[in-house]
Amino acid sequence: MTDRFDLKGKIALVTGASSGLGKHFAGVLAQAGAKVVLAARRMERLEALAAEIEAKGGEALAVSMDVTKADTIQAALEATIARFGGPADVIINNSGLSREAFFTNMEEDDYDLVMDTNTKGVWLVARTFAGALVTAGKPGSMINIASVAGKRVGYTMSAYCASKAACEHMTRNMAIEMARYGVRVNAIAPGYFETEINDTFLNSDEGEKMRKRIPMRRFGEHEELSGPMLLLASEAGSFMTGATLVVDGGHMWSAL
Ligand SMILES: NC(=O)c1ccc[n+]([C@@H]2O[C@H](COP(=O)([O-])OP(=O)(O)OC[C@H]3O[C@@H](n4cnc5c(N)ncnc54)[C@H](OP(=O)(O)O)[C@@H]3O)[C@@H](O)[C@H]2O)c1
């Protein structure tokens, strides 16, 4: 049964691999046997991670990508094909960021940045990388990193929550369009996991209050996303498409 989780011979792209969850996903996919393509803007971090993965016997390529810029995504696809001989079979759309303010005080540029990165960025990467699978006639699996915030609402989070709700719903649409090509498209909606996106908040008094409202009374460990990620990425999830796996310690259903 565990063979169905194996990714030997597969090529996996991870956007936002320079930090946090993306860095973790890249390590997990490499450990499962995939050749990994590490994408983000901070190349020095990606190079360091690639070296770490190769030191453990894996294969990794660091590519510079800004998910809001289509030309950098196309260049990353070309670099992937040049190094590994084909497009990525597994696409992890993980890059994301947040800007917070009551919506009446939010700058238009901040709203655009959140939407351009978390929603349009997912669409741009999907269009290029899933499109390349269709062109090559290869099956594959794409996983979009949404958020429990896309299912709920939070003060100061109007742009972020909307961007993640859109990311999740777009996943369903992409799933039905890609099914005929053998490309599965699913989402993971994490609850709170400590990374650079939220470490100041989670370590504040407000973060402590939030922790107490989570039914499991704690934030997630990065390792707790590994199983859901591998399930969707591999043959173990071969009949899953258009699904969202919520990994949040019960946060979504915290009681009134
Ligand atoms: N941590 C949580 O509790 C949590 C919960 C739910 C969902 N998420 C989602 O999980 C994903 C990863 O976040 P994280 O928690 O790991 O935060 P993080 O540590 O801040 O990582 C964010 C990553 O996104 C990349 N990124 C941002 N803008 C980009 C752009 N324009 N082009 C390419 N890459 C870009 C960053 O790389 P560069 O700056 O090097 O480009 C970085 O690697 C995000 O989509 C986030 O919304 C996180």
Image: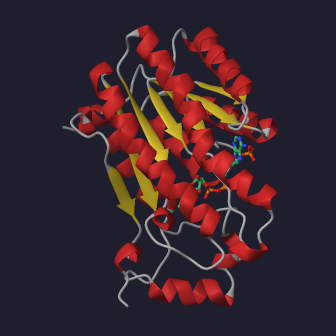
Q: Is residue 33 left or right of residue 197?
A: left
Q: Quadrant of the N terminus?
A: top left
Residue 148 in picture, x, y percent from top left: 46, 65
Q: Is residue 50 left or right of residue 179?
A: right
Residue drawn at (51%, 38%) of the image: 92
Q: Is residue 163 left or right of residue 105?
A: left
User: Residue placed farthest to the left in the image?
Assistant: 1
Q: Nearer the viewer, residue 18 or 213?
A: 213
The answer, for residue 36, to whether it is visible in the render is yes
Relative vertical location of residue 110 with respect to residue 12 in this rendering, above or below: below
Residue drawn at (79%, 35%) of the image: 43
Q: Nearer the viewer, residue 255 or 54?
A: 255
Q: Quadrant of the C terminus?
A: bottom left
Residue 171 in picture, x, y percent from top left: 41, 43
Residue drawn at (52%, 45%) of the image: 25
User: Residue placed farthest to the front in the image?
Assistant: 104
Residue 99 in picture, x, y percent from top left: 72, 64
The answer, for residue 56, to whether it is visible in the render is no
Q: Nearer the viewer, residue 202 or 96?
A: 96
Relative vertical location of residue 161 with respect to residue 12 in this rendering, above or below: below
Residue drawn at (48%, 89%) of the image: 212
Q: Nearer the viewer, residue 188 or 122?
A: 122
Q: Give the tally of numbered discs.
A: 0
Residue 95 in picture, x, y percent from top left: 62, 46
Tell me which colouring the rendered structure shows: secondary structure
